[in-house]
Amino acid sequence: MALTKLRKEIDAAVQLPVFDLSREELVEEALANGEGVLAANGALRVVTGKRTGRSPKDKFFVDDAVTHDELCWENNLPCSKATFDRLYAKMLAYAADHKMYVTDVYAGADPRYRLPVHFVNELAWQQLFIRNLFISNEEVPADAEGFTVLCMPNVYADPEADGVHSEMFVIINLTEKVVLIGGGRYAGEMKKGIFTVMNYLLPKHGVFSMHCSANVGPKGDTALFFGLSGTGKTTLSADGTRALVGDDEHGWSKDGIFNIEGGCYAKCVHLSEYTEPQIFRAIRKNTVLENVILDENGDPDYDDIALTENTRAAYPLTYIDNALLPSVAGHPKNIIFLTADAFGVLPPVAKLSKEQAMYHYLSGYTSKVAGTEDGIVEPQATFSIGFGEPFLPLPPLTYAKMLGQRIEEYGTNVYLINTGWSAGPYGKGHRIRLQYTRRLVNAVLDGELDNAEWVEFPVFGFKIPAACPDVPSEILNPRNTWEDKAAYDEQLHKLAMLFGKNVTKFHGLITEEILSAGPKA
């Protein structure tokens, strides 16, 4: 193997490299540099400044002759090669006289599909983040051909001169195999940048790349949990009775699934040892805590959202007691699509046909509620293809077809689990109790509902169980929980119409069987 031309240029430009420090050494460097402080539990607490989450409008792909006809430009932003070249030159100039932390890691737990990634970081804590989130316990050959990520928060773009939208930028050059990240400190950009690259590469090798968590039961049955932020993906997959494969990104090959990462990036808002013991206990020495407020004793206050609701913890999989290592497993027996329906009309559990599964995968529905963004005063439907549209560079049907093929080939069951509202919409009803959701998930995964009586749910057409042990039967059909049945029916048809409006973009692209598997408003 040979290094790319740009990789050689980058190696030559970095004049003050610090190679392959351990986690403990990176913590020491970060403290010495004034990048963060130690929390009482031993975690390294850092603040990311203005950017406390991803910036989708600042993420671009270089539009060149190689990738122009491959990528889906309806949901990805193009930039010119000239824009990449200007920002690349800025970063090389900066790297020439600033200390840089350098390491090589893998993305992908299956050796046949893993990607070597060469990270060059300005900040020690961000390099610690990389060591926690990617597979860093195996030596990467010096000449391994992979991708290179340059992450320098103090290199800013000039929006007008550089042809971008702000001072912050994420530029993915698939042809040159380089990712540029500058102008912001939020570490999730590095994680999702490489996930986006893997979503481009893996399908070319016949691997279905997925934005989901995964775990395995005592009998070896694998389950996947797809869902957008706030739907319970991390919470529900962290189950003490099942081994955790990973909490966010996976590939599904002809031999089974594998984790793309080597760590977890868990949300911390309102975290407690009672509700999420595995995550709570993983926040310790060498964990990175992003934007979490510390009290006067240095203890994290997970309820304080003064900086952001998007507080995060980054730790290696080895910090989870029942993590499956290496993080590879068999073909999924069950897939769960998670949604947090704030309209209060979807059932807490439903079983989907293959066509319904593809329809709801392409829809990727959840909802925003008042307070999550300025100007939102009532529930708003959110649709994100594949439950991860910002990370899908190829046309969406590439991924949907792979899902359909696998459901058919391996006989995988697909369920929709609603972790949102019951007895009314957000503001009037209440969130479905976590104990009921967990019970329903366990009933699905343990096969307790296999022989249940399933009845058709109106408008949406999927099946719901008539009963489930330890769950009140009246909540299984949400209409029963509303006092005003007419208001429920109106909300149900309103949501159905929003689904229908969203899928109009797929008319002529997907089969009538899939289109007709959606709700009938």
Image (cartoon, rainbow, N blue to C red):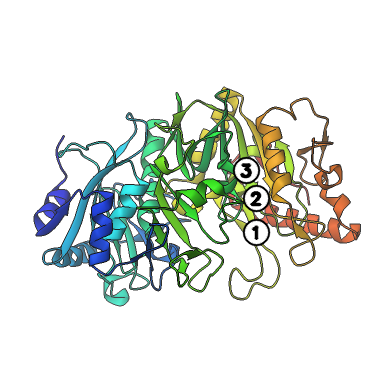
Q: Horizontal placement of 220 versus 206: left or right? A: right
Residue position marked by numbered label 3 in the rendering: 337
Compute the Cα span from label 1 to label 3.
Answer: 14 Å
Q: Nearer the viewer, residue 36 or 158?
A: 36
Q: Are marks 2 and 3 in contact (CB under 8 Å)?
A: yes
Instruction: Bin the neighbour count of mark 3 within 10 Å (Cα to Cα): few under 14, some 14-19, many 20 and up.
Output: many
Q: Horizontal placement of 213 versus 348: left or right? A: left
Residue position marked by numbered label 2 in the rendering: 339
Q: Horizontal placement of 252 versus 416: left or right? A: left
Label 2 secondary element: strand
**Amino acid residing under circle 2:** Thr
Q: Nearer the viewer, residue 57 or 112?
A: 112
- Residue appearing at x 80%, y 41% in the figure: 471
In this view, the residue farthest toward the front is 297
Compute the Cα span from label 2 to label 1.
Answer: 8 Å
Instruction: Bin the neighbour count of mark 2 within 10 Å (Cα to Cα): few under 14, some 14-19, many 20 and up.
Output: many
Residue position marked by numbered label 1 in the rendering: 367
Marks 1 and 3, the one that precedes in the sequence: 3
Q: Are marks 2 and 1 in contact (CB under 8 Å)?
A: yes
- Residue appearing at x 52%, y 45% in the figure: 278
In the rendering, at what x and y percent does residue 6 appear?
16, 51
Label 3 secondary element: strand
**Amino acid residing under circle 1:** Ser
Label 1 secondary element: strand
Marks 2 and 1, the one that precedes in the sequence: 2
- Residue appearing at x 11%, y 67% in the figure: 97
